[in-house]
Image (cartoon, rainbow, N blue to C red):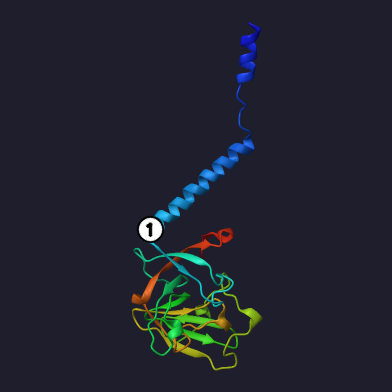
Amino acid sequence: MSDTKNKKAGGKQQEPTGAAVSAVEYLELFVFAFAFVIVLITLFARISWVSGPSMNKTLQNGEKLVISDLFYTPKQGDIVVFHQTSDTYERFNEPIVKRVIATGGQYVKIDYTAGRVYVSDDDVFTDNELLDESGYAYISGGVWKNAGHEPEVFAVPEGHLFVMGDNRNNSSDSRSVAIGCVDERRVLGRVLIRLTPFSAFGRVN
């Protein structure tokens, strides 16, 4: 009788602690999320990366991104990756990451000294057409490249995009002849997710 009791007492399994259960659940969630991202990339997306400081602080040099062009139509505010082909500016013959400022048929006015961008459906600009960039623009030092120049107006051809880097005083973008307005057919996709570093993994706005 006593042997039976001892066996029962010795064979009793210890219930896992709450911390252990949480750790297992967290690991399962991480594995599931990682597997989901891999499937997403394989079927509907591709990997790109950030080269240079032109998208600071939104994106940093060397970060890997998940992009997709599935059922995608570019719109203002999107971060896109595109590819130019140039015999003159070979350094731009690689995927480039920028933000869409205006789409085909619109006009862009840039006040370099005031650090303001206006987007209009015609070549007349009002204060109501000042682009609100408070959520993403980062101007290091507070002074734009070309500060002191007269305001400049750009007409965006149909089927093209006017793009700029968030780090406005350190970005080659549609303001320069090296890139100019981007043909929508050159867009590889919209940036969806920052893949690395893992500490910053998540959706990109």
Q: Identify which amino acid the numbered label 1 is placed on.
A: Thr
Q: In the rendered view, does 130 fall on the left or right side of 4?
A: left
Is the residue 177 above or below the residue 57 in the image? below
Q: Is residue 150 visible?
A: yes
Please tell me which residue lies in front, 136 or 188: 188
Residue 45 placement (x, y as % from top left): 39, 62
Name the secondary structure under disc 1. Answer: helix
Q: Residue at x 55, y 87 (%)?
A: 111
Please name the residue that numbered disc 1 is placed on: 42
The residue shown at (54%, 74%) is: 55
Crowdedness near tag 1: few (<14), some (14–19) or many (≥20) residues, C-alpha within 10 Å: few
- Which residue is at the far top? 1
Task: Answer left or right for 182 relative to 198.
Answer: left
Confirm whether residue 179 shows in the render.
no
- In the displayed structure, 117 sits above or below 26; it is below
What x and y, as percent, mark residue 17? 63, 33
